[in-house]
């Protein structure tokens, strides 16, 4: 296909040159019959060249895009070594004990005005808002699913997915941003094998959050694992921030 486009381009260029030559070069004054014959021959030639030009230009337009640099695809990319997943096993979702919701409703009340307080208590107990607990809350109170959806999506404190046992906060304030906070976040997610669109690893051991400021600008870039701060990080030293936590975790 690349060869066809190349040949078509050459033919089109030649046709343009012929047409330009015919337009520039005119028969010299002389015999009227010779001039008329030259004009007829040139007109006939120009008609043929014009059709050839149209055809070659069409071939060039059809095949030229396919003859450009090949885009990287599955067969063009050399396989690279996949980062090793975090060594902890994958945790399967555990059944939600709904007795807490029942006791909470009996203690706090069933009115719609209690929605935020009830959701905060559920989040504090389960560490997120399980769907089963929210359905039971709607069954036992005057709170509607629409009210829960609106409240839980409006306030940033509420989570709809399980959270890890340890919270990793990567600072993305101005000082940390210009010092490479994005590279630190990307490396932390790679180390913990957290897929795109998620914030918690499969073992539910770590949850990664990007925060506006940790108040440690002099240590930029900085992250905090629970209450332990690690600063002046580079992508190659980011793993050291997790060593104290992993040493405490059971094998």
Image: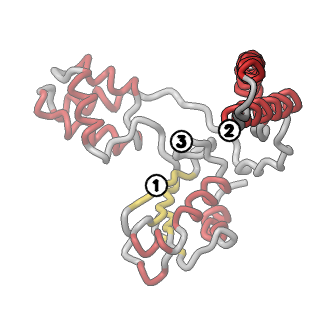
> Does 214 sit above or below residue 32?
below
Number of callouts in the render?
Answer: 3
**Which residue is painted at 48% across and 57% down in the image?**
167
Image quadrant where one finds the C terminus:
bottom right
Query: Which is more N-terminal, label 2 or label 3?
Result: 2
Label 3, residues with CA under 10 Å away: few <14, some 14-19, many ≥20: few
Q: Quadrant of residue 92?
A: top right
- How are the colours assigned in the image? secondary structure
Q: Which residue is mark 2?
A: 24
Q: Quadrant of residue 10?
A: top right
> Does 201 sit above or below residue 141?
below
> Does 18 sit above or below residue 83?
above
Q: Which residue is mark 1?
A: 209
**Which residue is painted at 67% across and 39% down in the image?**
90
Q: Secondary structure at mark 3?
A: loop
Q: Are marks 3 and 1 in contact (CB under 8 Å)?
A: no
Q: Which residue is mark 3?
A: 198
Q: Are marks 2 and 1 in contact (CB under 8 Å)?
A: no
Residue 119 screen position, x and y as percent: 27, 37
Query: Which is more N-terminal, label 1 or label 2?
Result: 2
Query: Which is more N-terminal, label 1 or label 3?
Result: 3
């Amino acid at each position: 296909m690349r060869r066809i486009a190349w040949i078509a381009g050459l033919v089109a260029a030649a046709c343009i040159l012929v047409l330009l030559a015919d337009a520039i070069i005119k028969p010299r004054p002389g015999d009227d019959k010779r001039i008329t014959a030259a004009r007829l021959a040139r007109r006939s030639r120009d008609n043929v060249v014009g059709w050839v030009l149209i055809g070659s230009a069409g071939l060039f337009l059809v095949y030229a895009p396919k003859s450009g640099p090949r885009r990287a695809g599955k067969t063009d990319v050399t396989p690279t070594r996949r980062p090793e997943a975090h060594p902890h096993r994958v945790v399967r979702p555990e059944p939600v004990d709904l007795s807490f919701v029942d006791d909470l409703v009996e203690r706090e009340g069933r009115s719609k005005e209690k929605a935020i307080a009830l959701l905060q208590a559920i989040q504090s107990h389960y560490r997120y808002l399980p769907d089963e607990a929210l359905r039971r809350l709607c069954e036992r109170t005057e709170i509607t699913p629409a009210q829960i959806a609106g409240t839980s999506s409006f306030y940033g404190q509420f989570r709809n997915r399980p959270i890890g046992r340890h919270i990793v906060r990567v600072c993305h304030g101005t000082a940390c941003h210009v010092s490479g906070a994005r590279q630190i976040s990307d490396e932390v997610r790679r180390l913990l094998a957290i897929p795109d669109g998620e914030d918690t690893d499969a073992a539910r051991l770590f949850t990664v959050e990007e925060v506006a400021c940790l108040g440690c600008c002099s240590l930029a870039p900085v992250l905090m694992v629970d209450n332990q701060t690690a600063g002046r990080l580079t992508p190659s030293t980011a793993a050291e921030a997790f060593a104290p936590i992993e040493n405490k975790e059971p094998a």
